[in-house]
Image (spheres, grey):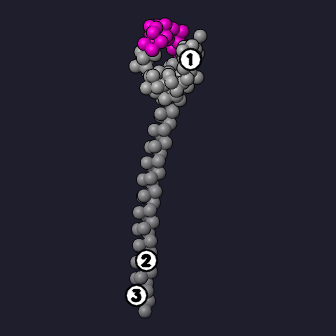
Amino acid sequence: MNFNDRLAELRKRRGLSQEQLGYELGVSRQTVSKWELGQSYPDFQRLVLLSDYYEMSLDELVRGVDVSDVRALNESEKQISSIYSDVERGKDLMGKAWRAFCVFGVIVLALFALAVAYGVLFAS
């Protein structure tokens, strides 16, 4: 049995909703749902709380956890974090490029205005 299935089974055996278990552990219902769907895993502190809550050892609680699944999920979270970081750097770069473009445009307009004014002064 997978860890996520074990968590759902333990919760249901106690007759708890995800919201009730989340309240007991200090997390949201959505967090419990993600654990039970295998989309994320509890941190160590929550694992200890879960083992205490269900009155079982950590070994009993996590036995059968596929470490490669945990590693793969952690790697995908790192990749997502890297993507967000790249997007933020891109936004910063675009902001700087936009400001440089605006400054350049103002300078060109000022020079054009001077040229027009200079031409008007000496045309008469």
**Rendered residue at 54%/9% (across/down):** 64
Amino acid marked by disc 3: Leu
Task: Give yes or no for residue 50 being in the magenta stretch.
Answer: no
* Of the pair 120 and 32, the residue shown nearer to us: 32
* Of the pair 96 and 63, the residue shown nearer to us: 63
Amino acid marked by disc 1: Gly
| Residue denoted by label 2 | 113
Q: Is residue 24 above or below residue 58?
A: below
* Of the pair 52 and 107, the residue shown nearer to us: 52
- Name the spot of residue 5 as percent of width and height, x first: 58, 15
View extreme (front): residue: 15
**Rendered residue at 42%/17% (across/down):** 49
Amino acid marked by disc 2: Ala
The answer, for residue 20, to whether it is visible in the render is: yes
**Rendered residue at 44%/80% (across/down):** 116
Task: Give yes or no for residue 62 being in the magenta stretch.
Answer: yes
Q: CA distance from mark 1 to mark 2?
A: 78 Å
Residue 121's tag is 3
Residue 15's tag is 1
Q: Residues within 10 Å of mark 1 (few under 14, many from 20)?
A: few
Specify start and end residues of the magenta stretch as a single range.
Answer: 51-68
Sequence-earlier tag: 2 or 3: 2
